[in-house]
Amino acid sequence: MSERTQGASQPAAKRTDVEDQAVDSATSVQHNEDCRLLELSAELRNIIYEFVLLQKDDIVVTPTLRSPALLQVSRQIRQETLAMWYESNTFEIAVNDCKTDLLRAWDRTHHALGVKSPSVLDITGIPNWGNLTRWCKAICEDDCTHLQKGSSDSRLECVIAAATGIAASCTKMSESKESSWAYCEELLGNLWHVAYRLDSRWVREMEVAEEGDA
């Protein structure tokens, strides 16, 4: 669990209905005047928020994961607890065979809500250079995060960390998304030779196609 985020003492900025619907339907949020919890002091509310929201173990992200019901009690409570839920817990996201559909959806939710949560990527499956390349391109297009912290120190994770780290660095150094990806793609070509020596399963898609035609 990461450092605690203040709730009622520092309420988050008011959000639009579009942002509210990024994770939960805004229609499920009740009006403030119907909530007795708001009659308590901010200090007591924060104690309740922390007891309900903060988890010692990592929260596993799934396509059906929803924020706790407490965030739906009222708009004010949602404003006071949204950052606490996302930023004071650590979330585990599975990346299998370098496919990042779930990770990208999670990142888009963060962008819509204006929050950023600590995440651990659970890297599983087999090497897939095509999927890894698409992951890196998404990073260059600012549509996905890179591997900062994984669940192990396997060779698979080492290659992924190197590739996505290159993409993240290219994004910072380049003036546009197009130039960022062009530079990244060139560097990934060099990295592939190293990755292939570590694990011959890092076959590029062009080699896979040629083997299938043979």
Image (cartoon, rainbow, N blue to C red):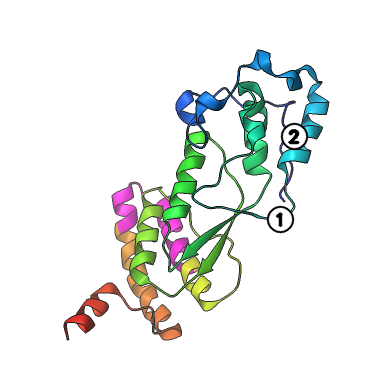
**Which class describes the residues within 10 Å of circle 2: few (<14), some (14-19), or many (20+)?**
many
* Viewer-side residue, 145 vs 174: 145
Query: In the rendered structure, which disc, 2 or 1, sits on the residue that comes first in sequence?
Result: 2
The residue carrying mark 1 is 57
Q: Which residue position is annotated with label 2?
A: 49
Asked if residue 18 lies in the magenta stretch, the reply is: no
Residue at the (51%, 37%) spot, across then down: 23
Position of residue 26 measured from the top left corner of the image (x, y, whole percent):
51, 26
Q: Which of 144 and 65 is in front in this view?
A: 65
Mark 2: amino acid:
Tyr
Few, some or many residues within 10 Å of mark 1 (<14, 14–19, 20+): few
Residue depicted at 49% across the width and 50% down the height: 63
Given residues 112 and 56, the one toward you in this image is 56
Vertical arrangement, residue 138 with respect to residue 49, above or below: below
Is residue 165 part of the magenta span, yes or no? yes
Apparent side of residue 167 relative to residue 30 in the rendered image (left or right): left
* Mark 2 residue element: helix
In this rendered view, identify the residue nearer to me: 101 or 195. 101
Q: Where is residue 25 in the image (x, y as percent from the top left)?
A: 50, 30
Q: Which residue is drawn at 61% across and 67% down?
A: 151
Question: Label 1 is placed on what type of residue?
Answer: Asp
Which quadrant is the C terminus positioned in? bottom left
User: Is 150 displayed left or right of 6 in the figure?
Assistant: left
Image location of residue 158, percent across then percent down = 52, 73
Which numbered circle lies on residue 168? none
The quarter holding residue 166 reads bottom left
Q: What's drawn in magenta, residue-wise?
A: 162-181
Q: In the displayed structure, does residue 42 sit left or right of residue 127?
A: right
| Residue 81 horizontal/vertical position (percent) | 67, 32
> Dividing the picture into quarters, in which one does residue 82 lie?
top right
Question: Which residue lies at the image location 58% right of the left edge and 65% below the top edge?
Answer: 150
